Structure formats: structure tokens, C-alpha cells
Amino acid sequence: MILVNATAAGARGLALGRPLGRRTVARSAAGRAPVGRGVVSPGLPVPAHIVRPAYAANASGSPERPDTHFEVQDTPDKVRRLRAACALAASVLERALGLCTEGTTTDEIDAAVHAMVVDAGAYPSPLLYKGFPKSVCTSVNEVVCHGIPDSRPLRRGDLVNVDVTVFLEGMHGDTSATMVVGGRDAGGAAGARLVRAAEEALEAGVGAVKPGLPISGIGLAIEAYARERGYGVVSEGTGHGVGEHFHVPPYVFHVANSYPGALREGMSFTIEPMLTERPDYEIALDANDGWTVVTKDGQLSAQFEHTVLVTAAGVEVLTARPPPRRP
Ligand code: MF3
Ligand code: CO
Ligand code: CO
């Protein structure tokens, strides 16, 4: 996701966003201890034969064409390559979620994702992106997004989001999901309901995608869905165009917004709503690592993300995962 604040949104003519505050509260209202930060091990090596995105080669990790490019897949070959990247991301995510068990560290999840991506001949897009140190984002409990995998073992009842992005055949595919460690009932009913609502809010957003409809309608649908159920939607984080570039326009807000323009066939972008337990929340950026976004009061947050393609008929969810097999 892309973080916007009031100033950036205002500069784009958008009436939304709030300034980021400092992380202050130590313990959530529910009495759950904050996740805290473990030890971050060094990033893993990528074999020389793997094609890297341009940002991975420059020292700052700056993306090559920030904010100018608009992803539109206008040839069958581009669509084919984007489908392949997204299918790989979905498959890696599915397998990574299966590894999120009690006692497993998020660092171990990172190593597993890294190996799966590299074994498939792809590059793990987060690694060195604007200096991000690891190959995947893992965001636990009050961590809203961009959590850095570390030495902390997952606990029964944790809400963990795994956000996988891969660069394959010149295309990025980006997808995430949140699960309750130990199963839906392990974290109590409130956590499971929040996870379900976040997934359904994403589906509501996907349902607003069709050529000719306003891009801004996606956020309207998501916010309406979440608010009817009493949840908050993190307004500061947007989806983004994705394909040859990781984070480019269009920016897809997850709340009511004034983002201009209509959906057109061939556009590819993410939808990735972050919901909070309560309608009111504030977020803060961890000042020590510059990445981890948390709820200030420690309330839980859950996120789901798909990369979608606008088609003549409506929408193709490129990162759809096969439904779980039942015995
Ligand atoms: N995958 C995230 C997104 O959904 C972006 C992660 S950028 C990183 O947009 F540098 F934190 F990895
Ligand atoms: Co994204
Ligand atoms: Co993502």
C-alpha cells in the first residue's frame, strides 16, 4: 500500500487523510501486550540469474518512475506475464499462510517465502524496495501493514497478515491475506469477525470494478461495507497501480474520496483495505524502523489484498487463490 497523509492528499486535490502521530500506547484496551520488535536478521541473497527490478540495483532502492506511470496492460503478452506473476504470488501466499503456526517466527516465514519465490525464478519485490530489508511483509495484531519479519514467534490467536509481492517476467504481482494463528476460534470471536470483514470488504471493492465506473467508487463500496459492521477503515493507505512497476497510479482509496478518473479496460491495480476493530483509530509509524505502521491504541487491524485487471466484462482477480480443499 501507499501511505498518504493530509498534506500529500491535499497536494493532489484530495479531501482526506490525517497526519501520522507518534506511537504512544503500550497496551491495548483488551489487555493484549503489543507485538513489539524482535531481532531482524540480514536479508537473504538472490541468485545472480534472477532478473531484478531496477530499484534493487540502486543504493536508495528508489523506484524508477515514481508517480508518473499509469499501468495499463494493452497487449496480450503483458496480460499473460502479469497473470503469471500474480498466479505465483497467490500460490506463494497460500503456502506461506500454511506455515503460520504457533511458535514459527516471522523470520522463518520470510525465509520460506524467499525460497519459494527464488525457486520459481522470480525476485521477492519487497527486498531492497526503498530500503526494505526483507522479502515479505508480516503484520501481526496491531501492526497495520509493512511489518518487518523478525525473531518473534507467532502465538496462538495472533492475527497475522502475510503480504507477498513477486517480480516475474518483468511484472509485479501483489497479494496479502490475514489469518488467525491456531485457527479461526483461537483468537476469540472478535478477531475472527474482523478478519472475515476485511476479506469481505475487499470483495465489496472488487465488486465496484467495471470499465466506465469511477475509480473512486471502490473506496466508497469498501467504506460502506466496513462501517455498516462497526469497523474502521485505514484511510491513509491506498491500493496502487501494479504491473511493470510496483507502486504507481491509479491510487485506489479505501474510503469515500475524490480521486479522479474512470476505470478502463487493461488497468491493473491492487485493492487492499485495512480494517480496524473500532471505527475510530489513529495510526503511527514506528520511528525506529521507518516501516512498521501500527494502531496507536493497540487495537487489532486486518488486511486483504488482490491485484485485479479491468476487463471488457468487468474484472479479473489475478491473485485469486483456490478455495481450501475440504476432506
Ligand atoms: N506489498 C505492499 C503493498 O501492498 C508493499 C510492501 S513495500 C515494502 O503495497 F517495501 F514494505 F515491502
Ligand atoms: Co499493494
Ligand atoms: Co502487498
Image (cartoon, rainbow, N blue to C red):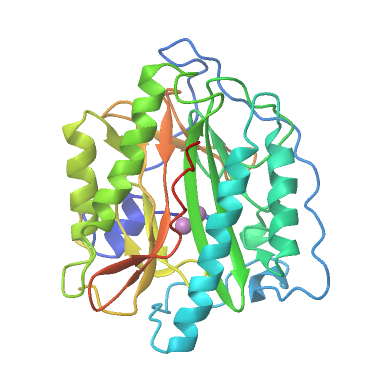
Question: Residue 96's x, y, as percent?
Answer: 62, 45
User: Which quadrant of the figure has residue 130?
Assistant: bottom right
Which of these two is toward me, 143 or 117? Answer: 117
* Left or right of 98 in this view: 216: left
Quarter of the image where the N terminus is located = bottom left
Report the residue that reaches farthest toward the top. 31
Q: Is residue 240 left or right of residue 52?
A: left
Asked whether residue 156 is in view, the answer is yes
Q: Tell me the residue at 42%/32% (across/down).
A: 301
Residue at 81% x, 48% y: name it.
42
Between 191 and 26, which is closer to the camera in this rendering? 191
Taking the view exactly as shown, the residue that stands out farthest to the front is 327
* Vertical arrangement, residue 210 with respect to residue 253, above or below: below
Q: Is residue 256 visible?
A: no
Is 128 rendered above or below residue 255? below
Looking at the picture, tell me which residue is in the foreground, 125 or 314. 314
Q: Position of residue 173 (x, y in %)?
A: 52, 65
Quadrant of ligand 1: it is: bottom right
Identify which residue, 2 or 182, lies in the foreground: 182
- Toward which corner of the image does residue 128 lie, by quadrant? bottom right
Residue at 62% x, 21% y is 155
Locate residue 40, reporting x and y percent: 75, 39
Vertically, is 210 above or below 73? above
Q: Report the residue at 51% width, 65% height from top.
A: 86
Left or right: 165 with respect to 232?
Answer: right
Q: How many marks?
A: 0
Residue 13 falls in image quadrant: bottom left
Give percent across and percent down for residue 316: 34, 67
